[in-house]
Amino acid sequence: MSLLVDYFPLILFFGTYKFYGIFAATAVAIGASIVQLVYMRLFKKIGVIHWLSLAIIVIFGGATLISRDPAFIQWKPSVLYLAFAALLVGGKLFWKRDLLKYVMKDIELPAHVWTKLTWAWSIFFIFLAALNRYVANHYSMDTWVNFKVWGTLAILLVFAVGQGVFIARYLKES
């Protein structure tokens, strides 16, 4: 159920885009993101990531709808990924904390492993931001939407599995 809640706006964005186009999909994504946070407020804890995501979809989606220029919504994933990277890097450099440790609070790892994970995820998010811009600038809207939904999800899954394999070496046997 948690996965459905997390991907609810993305699923609705994709489905709406396929039938009604980018402007309707953008409006639906904004509405779905608001509904997502209302649901989470009632049944779960809302994380910083969810507030950040909502702010970015409202700003960039709103700019898309007001200007009727889809370029703004194409910037949204890159801005979100760069914000994630900035949070991780800022946490490490300015607050001397590996913020992933708080996100994955149920996992105990040595400090040097958290540091490696922080840098790996930071670089990964920067890579995703650049890749999103490349696809947005060089391919059609259809290709970009498919990449945003399916390509990014596949890349994220492969990276997460790789991180899982890396982490497994350091987990203590219970």
Image (cartoon, grey):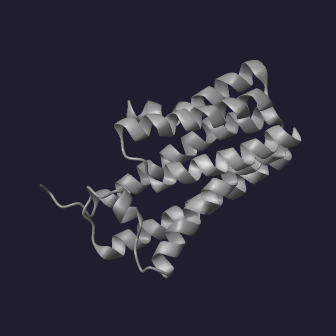
Camera-nearest residue between 62 and 141: 62
Residue 138 in view here: yes
Camera-nearest residue between 36 and 20: 36
Camera-nearest residue between 159 and 17: 17
Q: Position of residue 160 (x, y in %)?
A: 45, 50
Q: Residue at x 74, y 18 (%)?
A: 19
Q: Position of residue 145 (x, y in %)?
A: 72, 35
Q: Quadrant of residue 171?
A: bottom left
Q: How many marks?
A: 0
Q: Position of residue 75 (x, y in %)?
A: 75, 51
Q: Residue at x 63, y 61 (%)?
A: 82
Position of the N terminus, as image quadrant, is top left
Q: Quadrant of residue 78?
A: bottom right
Q: Looking at this rendering, what residue extends furthest in the left direction?
A: 174
Position of the C terminus, as image quadrant, is bottom left
Q: Position of residue 87 (x, y in %)?
A: 53, 67
Residue 69 in view here: no
* 76 left or right of 124 in image: right
Q: Residue at x 42, y 66 (%)?
A: 117
